Amino acid sequence: MRIVDVAALAGVSAGTASKALNGTGQLRAETRDRVRRAAEQLGFTPDPVGRGLSSGRSYTVGLITTDSFGRFSIPVMLGAENALGAGEMSVLLCDSRDDPLREQHYLRTLQARRVDGIIVTGRRTDPRPPLAASVPVVYAFTPSQDARDTSLVADQAAGAADAVQHVLDLGRRRVAHVTGPADHHATRVRAEAAERTAGEAFAGPVLHGDWSERWGRLAADLLLRRHPDLDAVTCGSDQIARGLCDGLRDAGRRVPQDVAVVGFDDWDVIALASRPPLTTVNLGLEALGRRAGELLLQAVAGEPSPGTTTLPTRLVVRESTVPA
């Protein structure tokens, strides 16, 4: 099958058909759609090498992440692929494992492969040093320290505030907050918003530990000793919240009848397996990745969007705050 066959079926010239399939030229959307439908009908697949040579692009994008477990990077990548797929671009995933030397190696490798752009993400929300790249870069979830770069972040403060407001609206009046290491950006942002929203109902101080179920179980004992009248806890992660539910149950407290518990991240393998399933804050990572892909496409086309964009989170209500 040849490009001239696609052109004949679509009723356009071979040159117009080539531009429509390569995403080049100034064509009407109707013309592009007609050519693409003709190509699909005939089973025509453009030659990627020839396409790249004619356009000066590789139609590939690199995604560099520090998230070895994929908890945050995989949803971001899925969202980015949804956006980039519309431009028929492929994504090359590179895991730097928090190693600056490995990251530089991947950067050199991606640039040698002549990628059109790079998306940078990770498992933490602390601003990171920018990449010295020769192609457009978009930072997703983990923002750049340079305000001139294009960064996308989740509105963690609003998510933490929504979690506390939810339990207050349920009539809870003694609300504690259990979270991760104090030196993490996500910890500080979420804890400050939780304490501020709780106001006089806050059962302080904030309890800091690691991001684990074990810490959640230990925190349950500490909280009940300090605040016997505790009736709600918001947590900095789903892992902590799941452990907290276990600790409360071991102490004879019912969730949510005696104590309502809210997690953060909406990690389904944790949130849904908790007893009971967790009310939690969804970070909207796929939407964030999709927007990162869209902004990268715009930057590749010569229309960058410098600055930081904040995307909304969403409270997902389950049985840890509202009985089934």
Image: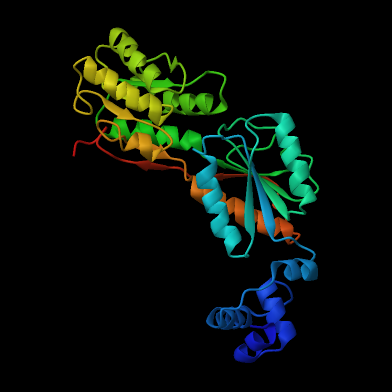
Q: Position of residue 287 (x, y in %)?
A: 51, 51
Is 110 located above or below residue 31 in the figure?
above
Which residue occupies 71% across, 83% down?
16
The residue most toward the top is 225
Total labels drawn: 0
Q: Position of residue 279 (x, y in %)?
A: 32, 36
- Judged left or right of residue 275, residue 5 is right
Q: Position of residue 125 (x, y in %)?
A: 58, 33
Which residue occupies 41% across, 28% down?
197
The residue most toward the front is 1
Q: Position of residue 112 (x, y in %)?
A: 79, 49
Task: State whether residue 311 appears in this view.
Answer: no
* Quarter of the figure that contains the C terminus: top left
Which residue is nearer to you in this view: 223 or 24? 24
Which residue occupies 19% across, 27% down?
257
Is 127 located above or below residue 180 in the figure?
below
Which residue is nearer to you in this view: 277 or 28? 277
Is 193 located above or below residue 317 in the figure?
above
Task: State whether residue 316 appears in this view.
Answer: yes
Which residue occupies 73% across, 56% down?
116
* Quarter of the figure that contains the N terminus: bottom right
Is 6 located above or below residue 160 in the figure?
below
